[in-house]
Image: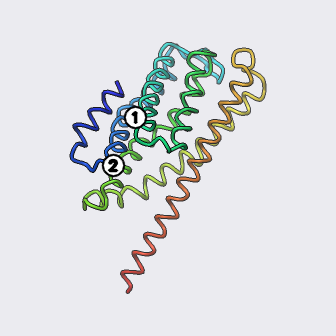
């Protein structure tokens, strides 16, 4: 499905865009069809009657497994995009491979722990609509005035939203995960090497996210300061 959507984005939706930015724009296009829908799907699966008294080692419910499979299909499609158009982007390729490892082991290997993984997925994707819109505006800001206006308008609230989610909520939740898994309560159904690898992947992803958004805040500050200086002159 996502490969089909990517093709539609590349050859139809963004066909008039410069060939250098069409791949990234098409990647954002398929992300629109994954990010927000998976947030609602994951929330629904966590709140459903099948998921009673869940903990971080609860058996996966059918709806949770469906949600995980939905995300697997997206990350595989986007991974293909990077391997074809950006094969040297090792950071994103590594991110997608690591994310796929976590989701696939949860879905097909241990069959437990989706309650934790899906909350992480919600925290990761809840900002995706803003991020994709911001990315598309950024791609066209130099040649489209409205794109530049949208980029300038979105940057501060998007950065703030992203900072709260990735800089506060996600680390807090990961801390709770770590306390649970270290206690040994999950070792019977989720082997230690599995949950340890999950923690390494998630902590690494959060650290990179915090570094990324910190650099964006610094860049925004420099841009606004430089703009004020030009006005004064």
Q: Is residue 84 left or right of residue 183?
A: left
Few, some or many residues within 10 Å of mark 2 (<14, 14–19, 20+): some
Labelled disc at residue 21: 2
> How far across and down, in percent of the image, does residue 71 sit?
46, 27
The quarter of the picture where residue 90 lies is top right
Tell me if 229 is positioned left or right of 118 in this view: left
> Where is 114 relative to 9, above or below?
above
Residue drawn at x 75%, y 19% is 187
- Mark nearest the camera among 2 and 1 is 2
Q: Is residue 230 left or right of residue 203?
A: left
Label 2 and label 1: CA atoms lie apart by: 23 Å
Percent across and percent down for residue 24 are 37, 44
Q: How is the image coloured?
A: rainbow
Return the residue at label 1.
Answer: 36
Q: Earlier in the sequence, mark 2 or mark 1?
A: 2
Q: Nearer the viewer, residue 78 or 217?
A: 78
Which quarter of the image is occupied by the C terminus?
Answer: bottom left
Q: Which quadrant would residue 101 be assigned to in this image?
A: top right
Mark 2: secondary structure: loop
Q: Which residue is painted at 48% across and 70% down in the image?
A: 222
Residue that lies at the very extreme toward the bottom in this rendered image:
233
């Amino acid at each position: 499905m996502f490969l089909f959507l990517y093709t539609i984005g590349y050859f139809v939706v963004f066909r008039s865009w410069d060939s250098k930015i069409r791949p990234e724009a098409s990647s954002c296009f398929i992300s629109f069809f994954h990010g927000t829908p998976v947030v609602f799907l994951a929330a629904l699966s966590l709140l459903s009657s099948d998921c009673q008294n869940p903990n971080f080692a609860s058996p996966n419910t059918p709806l949770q497994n469906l949600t995980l499979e939905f995300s697997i299909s997206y990350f595989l499609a986007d991974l293909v995009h990077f391997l074809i158009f950006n094969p040297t982007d090792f950071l994103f390729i590594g991110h997608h491979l690591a994310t796929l490892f976590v989701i696939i082991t949860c879905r097909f290997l241990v069959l437990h722990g989706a309650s934790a993984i899906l909350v992480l997925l919600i925290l990761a994707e809840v900002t995706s609509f803003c991020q994709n819109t911001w990315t598309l505006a950024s791609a066209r800001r130099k040649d489209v005035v409205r794109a530049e206006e949208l980029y300038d308008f979105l940057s501060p609230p998007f950065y703030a939203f992203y900072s709260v989610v990735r800089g506060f909520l996600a680390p807090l939740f990961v801390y709770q995960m770590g306390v649970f898994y270290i206690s040994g309560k999950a070792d019977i159904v989720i082997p230690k090497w599995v949950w340890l690898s999950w923690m390494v992947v998630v902590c690494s992803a959060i650290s990179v996210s915090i570094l990324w958004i910190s650099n964006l805040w610094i860049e925004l500050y420099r841009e606004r300061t430089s703009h004020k200086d030009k006005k004064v002159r």
